[in-house]
Image (spheres, rainbow, N blue to C red):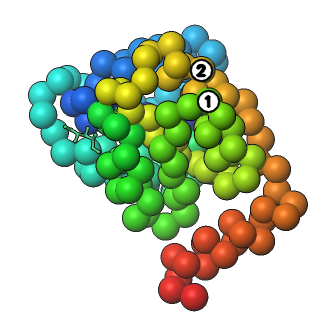
Amino acid sequence: MTMDKTIAVGADHAGFELKTLLVEHLKENGYDVQDVGTHSEESVDYPDYAAKVAKTVASRRAGQGILVCGSGLGVAIAANKIDGVRAVTANTAELARLSRLHNDANVLAVGARIIEPGTAKEIVDSWLQTEYEGGRHQRRVDKITRLENGK
Ligand code: RB5
């Protein structure tokens, strides 16, 4: 079952504090949040949390996913290993918007060591409020999906 208003959220230790703020922000805006951790600043490995969010989105237990690490880079690289996931690092609101419009990105990654919390909230809002445009972009997104099957 697709749960479009459900957002899976995860972070490593570097992203923990920003994740906490984003979870609060999402709840205030009416989203159901599935927080997969981490739940402290104790050092962990970002691929573990990226995989949890990516698998939650790929299996449609959440409509979209948000990941936070220091840069936003490692979690996106890891999340993209899961079939069905199109994860992007977007440390500006414009990139977040374009990733929805053109790429139908279903996982957003941000870097807690790169952006301020206020900017992160703007990025998340822009990403969640932008609909995929479809049309000419669908053929290209379909080609990305075919790469998962080695075609
Ligand atoms: C952790 O120090 C850091 O490497 C991680 O949060 C992330 O930025 C990796 O891409």
Identity of the residue drawn at 56% across and 31% down: 92
Identity of the residue drawn at 22% across and 30% down: 13
Query: Which quarter of the frame holds ligand 1?
Result: top left
Q: Is residue 50 above or below residue 31?
A: below
Query: Dot 2: what SS?
Result: helix
Q: Label 1: which residue? A: 93
Image location of residue 81, percent across then percent down: 40, 64
Q: Left of 31 or right of it: where is 75?
A: left
Q: Front-most of 120 and 81?
A: 120
Q: Label 2: which residue? A: 122
Residue 71 visible in image: yes
Q: Left of 19 or right of it: where is 130?
A: right
Image location of residue 133, percent across then percent down: 82, 50
> As shown in the figure, which amino acid type bears the numbered disc 1?
Ala
> As shown in the figure, which amino acid type bears the numbered disc 2?
Glu
Crowding near pointer 1: few (<14 within 10 Å), some, many (20+)?
Answer: some
Q: Quadrant of the C terminus?
A: bottom right
Identity of the residue drawn at 61% across and 38% down: 96
Most distant residue in the right direction? 135
Most distant residue in the left direction? 42
Query: Dot 1: what SS?
Result: helix
Q: Which mark is residue 12?
A: none
Q: Are marks 2 and 1 in contact (CB under 8 Å)?
A: yes
Identity of the residue drawn at 26% across and 49% down: 48
Quadrant of the rendered image containing residue 128 = top right
Quadrant of the rendered image containing residue 134 = bottom right
Q: Left of 90 or right of it: where is 15?
A: left
**N-term mark: 2 or 1:** 1
Residue 23 visible in image: no
Whether disc 1's CB lies below 8 Å from ligand 1 is answered no
